[in-house]
Amino acid sequence: MGVEGCTKCIKYLLFVFNFVFWLAGGVILGVALWLRHDSQTTSILHLNLDDKPAPSTFYVGIYILIAVGAVMMFVGFLGCYGAIQESQCLLGTFFTCLVILFACEVAAGIWGFVNRDKIAKDVKQFYDQALNKAVLEENAGNAKTVVKSFHETLGCCGSDALTSLITAAIKSELCPSGSNVLITPFKANCHQKIDELFSGKLYLIGIAAIVVAVIMIFEMILSMVLCCGIRNSSVY
């Protein structure tokens, strides 16, 4: 004889929440893999300037997201199975995993908040260094390749920080032909494009994290209520 009444409703409600949690884990894993292999970020973050790689801070967050998505799928399955089987052991393990996962998510959120500007800032500095070398130094073939990759990927040219180099950059044919920099040189500002690229993706990650955190809080409450209901049922 299993749980009855309201506790039974909680059992199936917890199962539904865990199924949604499992699906959310799959979505987060898929989004993280998409962000990891996105053509724009890959084209920029795989560049090397004189054996100096592009900043990889963005990928640290992506790898954390991949791990969270995979763990969420496992924990969601564990919660579904524990709820259907009415197992205190599985539900206790599930609750512990949720607490750990929630703590990791909070830590990742703090890390993301602290580094939200650093990611774009590091990439902009990398671009400025490459543009400096490409325009001012001779035999800067590698730097020109890096700059052209930025320009072609983002459809931009130059930055406010390097206004004196814009004309030289145009003359050296570093800018993409479709950027209209000759008409409006700063309309396609590379610093602005870099901010847009990473802020949009970080915004997406933030939304996903908030949704998952809310689901986890509900699941922790329901799992404890169900566990207490099983303990107090006539089975025990």
Image (spheres, helix red, strand yellow):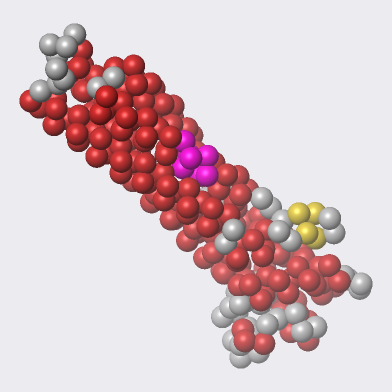
Q: Is residue 39 visible?
A: yes
Q: Is residue 174 magenta?
A: no
- Farthest residue, direction right: 139
Compare residues 41 and 28 and report the one nearer the observer: 28
Which part of the image, by quadrant, shows the C terminus?
A: top left
* In the depicted structure, whether residue 19 falls above or below residue 202: above
Residue under the image location 78 percent in, 71 percent down? 145
In the rendered image, residue 142, in percent from the top left (x then y), is placed at: 84, 67
Location of residue 183 (image quadrant): bottom right
Q: Is residue 156 left or right of residue 212?
A: right
Q: Is residue 176 left or right of residue 211?
A: right
- Farthest residue, direction top: 236
Residue under the image location 43 percent in, 31 percent down? 101
Q: Is residue 164 visible?
A: no
Residue under the image location 47 percent in, 61 percent down? 200
Q: Is residue 233 left or right of residue 222?
A: left
Q: Is residue 137 left or right of residue 98?
A: right
